[in-house]
Amino acid sequence: MKIAFFDTHGFEKEVFCKINEKFDFDIDFLEIRLTAKTAFLAKNADVICSFVNDKIDSECIEILSRLGVKLIALRSAGYNHVDISTAAQNKIVVARVPAYSPHAVAEFAVGLLLTLNRKIHRSHSRVRELNFSLDGLVGFDLFGKTIGIVGTGRIGQVMCHIMKGFGCRVLAYDIKVDTDLEKDGVVTYTDLETLVKESDIISLHVPLTPSTHHLLDRARIEQMKDGVFIINTGRGALLDSKALLFGLKSGKIGAAGLDVYEEEEGVFFHDLSNKVLQDDTLARFLTFPNVLVTSHQAFLTQEALAHIAQTTLESIKEFQLEGSVSQSKTVSSI
């Protein structure tokens, strides 16, 4: 079975090659992103393997269908970059990695929070210039603070437990209540409005859907406590970037840790150090001392990469043998 592996990155190729020794698939590693313009490169491939910033819209899927592709294997949990309905109409199965390492993402979110709160990034830059002053580096104890966790799926659950360990009051919002979290006294579930109003820190861990697009907009931000910290390791468009900019400039938002950005396509995962950044909003974020932007790396641990590769190749093998992928990893029917 031949696999066209789009948007290949060095950090994952070695892992996939090693694990593929057990499967012996014919993998064509392509550095280019999958879009309607590049889909022709999947000629003769049975399977497409896609990364999170590929653009698999209806036009792209129609081309893949004409080329005979029957399976799109996503190297991610999220699938908002795929036109699921068009895939279903063309009888193309879309498989994902429903969980790889929730600890990786949750721990990174905490890392963003700690770095921003204790000004570690600023201190590091100062000391490298032999400036050992402590002025402007005052943070606060996390103990006793209220953190709002939006989304208590696998990642959100880990985040709740970590923050409970810090001695925080943990509020949670999700359309589905995790009774174990509540029963064990880890969290208190509440509505989104209450969470937004009472939290000192808000961390986003929900998938991007039409109902969660700009979940935190200007109206929500205006309801927040003055000086609130916002951490987003979910999807960029959960947070309205223009509203976030307003909140930072007005002082309503005390700090923001962003591992994702709603216009990250074509920017994140690329070396643009010799170019002029064309995104004015992102460029503005990079000027704030209380904003930390990372390039969608929260998932990037050895354990997560190995699990992504193993699950992805297992799904492809399952499809090869049975013509389908187990429901827990399939999003075609969602």
Image (spheres, helix red, strand yellow):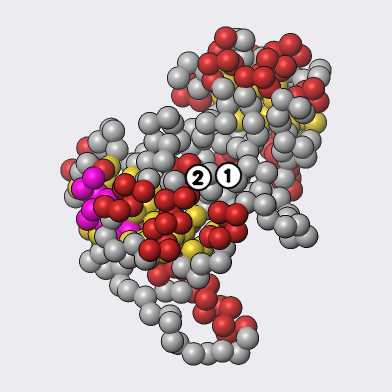
Q: Can the viewer see residue 194 in this picture?
A: yes
In this picture, which residue range is highlighted in magenta? Answer: 193-201
The answer for how far apart the CA atoms under marks 1 and 2 are is: 7 Å
Asked if residue 21 lies left or right of residue 293, the reply is right
Kind of residue at badge 1: Glu
Location of residue 50 with respect to 220 vertically, above or below: above
- Say whether disc 1 or disc 2 marks the residue closer to the N-terminus: 2
The quarter of the picture where the N terminus appears is top right
The quarter of the picture where the C terminus appears is top left
In terms of secondary structure, where does tag 1 sit? loop
Mark carried by residue 263 = 1
Location of residue 224 with respect to 172 vertically, above or below: below
Residue drawn at x 44%, y 87% as measured from the top left: 135
Q: Which of 181 and 88 lies nearest the eye of the viewer?
A: 88
Kind of residue at badge 2: Gly
Q: Position of residue 307 (x, y in %)?
A: 57, 40
Residue drawn at x 54%, y 20% as measured from the top left: 84
User: Disc 1, disc 2: CB below 8 Å?
Assistant: yes
From the image, tell me which residue sits under label 2.
236
Q: Position of residue 299 (x, y in %)?
A: 54, 48
